Amino acid sequence: MVIPEETCIRDFLFSRLEKADICHEWLPLISTGTQPNLNAAKLKDWELKVPSTQERKTIGEFFHALDDLAAALARKIELLERRKTAYLQRLFV
């Protein structure tokens, strides 16, 4: 998949593909056998509706901000877990 350099398109496309995965939109395109297979030839027929540039930008920025927030919260949780471990080590000597 070749993605133009425009950030709004990349972020929108990433969010749209993530939604397709969550909603199992790939299932009708997957060949079953010994191993499920999704190839480029089948993916060519998958329709991707693309909104206006401004709407793509707004959607992409929204989900990018949510990803940043989730990452920041994950870092905060990790720091709190480290702090808890340190307190438990000091408290129960």
Image (cartoon, rainbow, N blue to C red):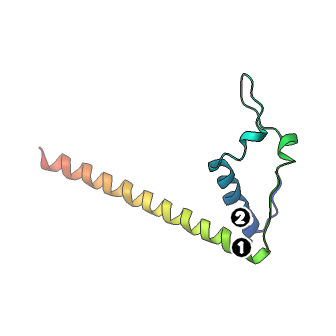
What residue sits 78% from the left and 40% below the top?
Answer: 29
Element carrying mark 2? helix
Side of 90 relative to 37 (left or right): left
Q: Which residue is mark 2?
A: 12
Side of 89 relative to 44 (left or right): left
Element carrying mark 1? helix
| Front-lying residue, 39 or 83 | 39
Name the amino acid type tagged 1.
Answer: Lys
What residue sits 64% from the left and 71% below the top?
Answer: 61
Name the amino acid type tagged 2.
Answer: Phe
**Marked residue nearer the N-terminal end (1 or 2):** 2
- Can you tell which mark lies on residue 57? 1
What residue sits 74% from the left and 28% below the top?
Answer: 32
Does the residue at mark 1 contact the one at mark 2 (Cβ under 8 Å)? yes
**Above or below, comparing residue 55 to residue 29 in the picture:** below
* Mark 2 neighbour class, 10 Å CA radius: few under 14, some 14 to 19, many 20 or more: many
| Front-lying residue, 90 or 73 | 73
Q: Quadrant of the C terminus?
A: top left
What residue sits 75% from the left and 24% below the top?
Answer: 33
**Structural distance between the alpha carbons of marks 1 and 2:** 7 Å
Side of 93 relative to 33 (left or right): left
* Mark 1 neighbour class, 10 Å CA radius: few under 14, some 14 to 19, many 20 or more: some
Q: Quadrant of residue 57?
A: bottom right
Q: Quadrant of residue 74?
A: bottom left
Residue 69 in the image, given as x and y percentages of width and height: 50, 66
**Above or below, comparing residue 6 to residue 42 in the picture:** below
Residue 26 in the image, given as x and y percentages of width and height: 73, 44
Residue 8 in the image, given as x and y percentages of width and height: 73, 69
